[in-house]
Image (cartoon, grey):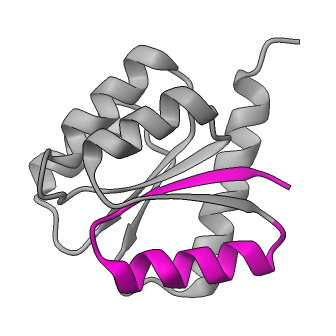
């Protein structure tokens, strides 16, 4: 399956996503802070990144911009507990696959992950 990086500062969200994604057969990498998430992205080259918009050490848009400098086509799913419309518009301009509210359903997570993996396959060189 896929290597998925989750960048979120809420332990409950991290553990939930880790459990769900591992049950689906994915390798899961966790980062509780933006800088550590960026380092993991650079070192591990995940196939999909799930990124919280509101992190304590850096906002999610800044993290997304740094991810884009490393890999402009990397599939990213934004997780938000109430991000602004401006932030969501900026994230869309930066090419995110989907937005999931923090109260997401597992079905919606599965759909977003499927789209992200498909996008990642299209972006890889042949």
**Residue at figure coordinates x 27%, y 54% from the top left:** 33
Q: Position of residue 38 (x, y in %)?
A: 38, 35
x, y percentage for residue 5?
55, 52
Determine the residue positioned at 63% across, 40% down.
46
Up-down relation of residue 106 to residue 32 (above or below): below
Q: Quadrant of the C terminus?
A: top right
Residue 74 percent location from the top left of the image: 56, 31
Question: Is 43 left, or right, of 122 in this rendering?
Answer: left
Along the horizontal axis of the image, is 56 left or right of 116? left
Q: Is residue 20 magenta?
A: yes
- Extent of the magenta region: 1-25
In the picture provided, is 8 more to the left or to the right than 110?
A: left
Q: Nearer the viewer, residue 114 or 18?
A: 18
The residue drawn where x is 80% and y is 12% is: 125
- Residue drawn at x 39%, y 45% is 37
Vertical placement of residue 19 versus 28, above or below:
below
Q: Nearer the viewer, residue 33 or 92?
A: 33
Q: How many discs appear?
A: 0
Q: Nearer the viewer, residue 31 or 101?
A: 31
Percent x, y of residue 115? 67, 52
Q: Quadrant of the N terminus?
A: bottom right
Relative to 84, residue 104 above or below? below
Query: Residue 56's image quarter?
Result: bottom left
The verdict on residue 126 being magenta is no
């Amino acid at each position: 399956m896929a290597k998925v990086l989750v960048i979120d500062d809420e332990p409950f969200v991290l553990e939930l996503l880790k459990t769900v994604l591992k049950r689906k057969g994915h390798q899961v990498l966790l980062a509780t802070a933006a800088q550590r998430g960026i380092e993991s992205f650079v070192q591990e080259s995940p196939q999909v990144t799930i990124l919280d918009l509101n992190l304590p050490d850096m906002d999610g848009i800044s993290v997304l911009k740094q991810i884009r400098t490393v890999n402009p086509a990397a599939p990213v799913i934004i997780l938000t507990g109430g991000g602004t419309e401006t932030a969501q518009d900026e994230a869309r301009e930066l090419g995110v696959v989907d937005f999931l509210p923090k109260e997401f359903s597992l079905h919606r997570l599965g759909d977003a992950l499927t789209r992200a993996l498909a996008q990642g396959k299209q972006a890889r060189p042949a």
